[in-house]
């Protein structure tokens, strides 16, 4: 009787352990010690990003054409490259985006991104 109980308990504990291992846990930033009970303020770790002068183009609707969707995604890709400061790829992506037909709003936005790319 005791062996059956131990085996059953082992099977249940293993099942619970395996079920819990599959769950993803969010990474929490390490807490910094505080002095005299005063909470510490977070320090900025990165320099402030350049302020964009124009709003990004609107996301494509399901009724938009294939060309419109490709254009919007190309602009998003260019924006990501500029944000990561990958200038070589940003220049190549800029050339590709400029060959597409852009709305006036998209053209202004691409021009603002172009101004952020160093020569």
Image (cartoon, rainbow, N blue to C red):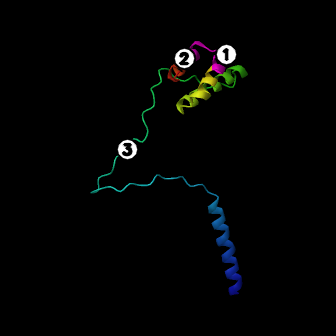
Q: CA distance from mark 1 to mark 3?
A: 42 Å
* Identity of the residue furthest to the bottom in this view: 1
Q: Secondary structure at mark 2?
A: helix
**Dots 2, 3 in contact, CB < 8 A:** no
Q: CA distance from mark 2 to mark 3?
A: 33 Å
* Magenta range: 95-110
> Can residue 1 be found in the magenta stretch?
no
User: On the image, which quarter does residue 102 sit in?
Assistant: top right
| Residue 65 showing in the rendered view | no
Image mark count: 3
Tell me the residue at 67%/68% (across/down).
15
Kindly identify which residue carries mark 1: 99
Q: CA distance from mark 1 to mark 2?
A: 13 Å
Graded by Cα atoms within 10 Å as few (under 14), some (14 to 19) or many (20 or more), the crowding at tag 3 reads few
Q: Secondary structure at mark 3?
A: loop
Q: Earlier in the sequence, mark 1 or mark 2?
A: 1
In the rendering, at what x and y percent does residue 2 appear? 68, 86
Tell me the residue at 62%/28% (across/down).
89
**Dots 1, 2 in contact, CB < 8 A:** no
Q: Which label number is shown at residue 111?
A: 2
> Can residue 96 be found in the magenta stretch?
yes
As drawn, 6 above or below 49: below
* Identity of the residue furthest to the top in this view: 104
Q: Earlier in the sequence, mark 1 or mark 3?
A: 3
Kindly identify which residue carries mark 3: 43
């Amino acid at each position: 009787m005791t062996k059956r109980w131990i085996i059953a308990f082992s099977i249940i504990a293993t099942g619970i352990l395996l079920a819990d291992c599959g769950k993803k846990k969010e990474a929490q930033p390490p807490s910094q010690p505080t002095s005299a009970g005063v909470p510490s303020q977070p320090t900025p770790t990165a320099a402030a990003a350049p302020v964009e002068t124009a709003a990004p183009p609107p996301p494509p609707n399901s009724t938009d054409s294939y060309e419109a969707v490709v254009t919007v995604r190309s602009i998003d890709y260019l924006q990501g490259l500029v944000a990561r400061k990958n200038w070589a790829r940003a220049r190549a992506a800029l050339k590709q985006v400029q060959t597409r037909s852009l709305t006036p709003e998209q053209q202004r936005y691409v021009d603002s991104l172009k101004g952020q790319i160093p020569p």
